[in-house]
Amino acid sequence: MFQLSIYVRHCASVENANVHTKRVKSFLPEHGNVCIITITDKQFGEIEVFIGKRSKAPNAPGQQLELF
């Protein structure tokens, strides 16, 4: 496993991405790791998502009682 959480931010240009990278570097946690990967819109568009078992539909909501 490489990550516990993934956060995505769209940047309109490489220069804009560099600004955000510098900002993240200034707030690094004392314990832990932060990895940043920069990809193009085309590369992002080619991401393949694989889903295991489909989640089942949520249960119907229960009856709600009102007490006066």
Image: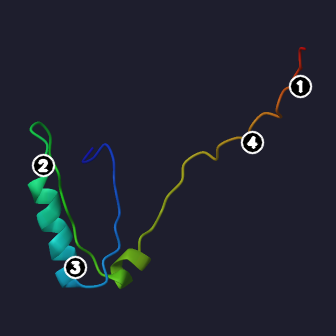
Position of 54 with respect to 41 (left or right) is right
Position of 52 with respect to 7 (left or right) is right
Q: Name the residue under label 4.
A: 57
Q: Name the residue under label 2.
A: 28
Instruction: Count residues near mark 3 (Cα–Cα under 10 Å), then give few for <14, some for 14-19, many for 20+.
Output: few
Estimate the spatial distance between the alpha carbons at disc 3 and disc 1, rounded to whole Å.
51 Å
Q: Name the residue under label 1.
A: 63
Q: Taking 8 as reference, is 30 above or below it?
A: above
Q: Name the residue under label 3.
A: 16
Estimate the spatial distance between the alpha carbons at disc 2 and disc 4, rounded to whole Å.
40 Å
Instruction: Count residues near mark 1 (Cα–Cα under 10 Å), then give few for <14, some for 14-19, many for 20+.
Output: few
Instruction: Count residues near mark 4 (Cα–Cα under 10 Å), then give few for <14, some for 14-19, many for 20+.
Output: few
Q: Is mark 1 on a helix, strand or loop?
A: loop
Q: Quadrant of the rendered structure where residue 26 is?
A: bottom left
- Residue for point 27% across, 47% down: 3
Type of residue at label 2?
Leu
Indicate which label's residue lies in the foreground, 4 or 3.
3
* Residue 67 percent location from the top left of the image: 89, 14
Q: Nearer the viewer, residue 14 or 40?
A: 14
Estimate the spatial distance between the alpha carbons at disc 2 and disc 3, rounded to whole Å.
19 Å
| Sequence order check, earlier mark of 1 and 4 | 4
Type of residue at label 4?
Ala
Instruction: Count residues near mark 2 (Cα–Cα under 10 Å), then give few for <14, some for 14-19, many for 20+.
Output: few
Type of residue at label 3?
Asn
Q: In which quarter of the image is the C terminus?
A: top right
Q: Taking 49 as reference, is 12 above or below it?
A: below
* Residue 40 percent location from the top left of the image: 30, 81
Q: Which of 3 and 48 is in front in this view?
A: 3
Type of residue at label 1?
Gln
Label ID, residue 46: none
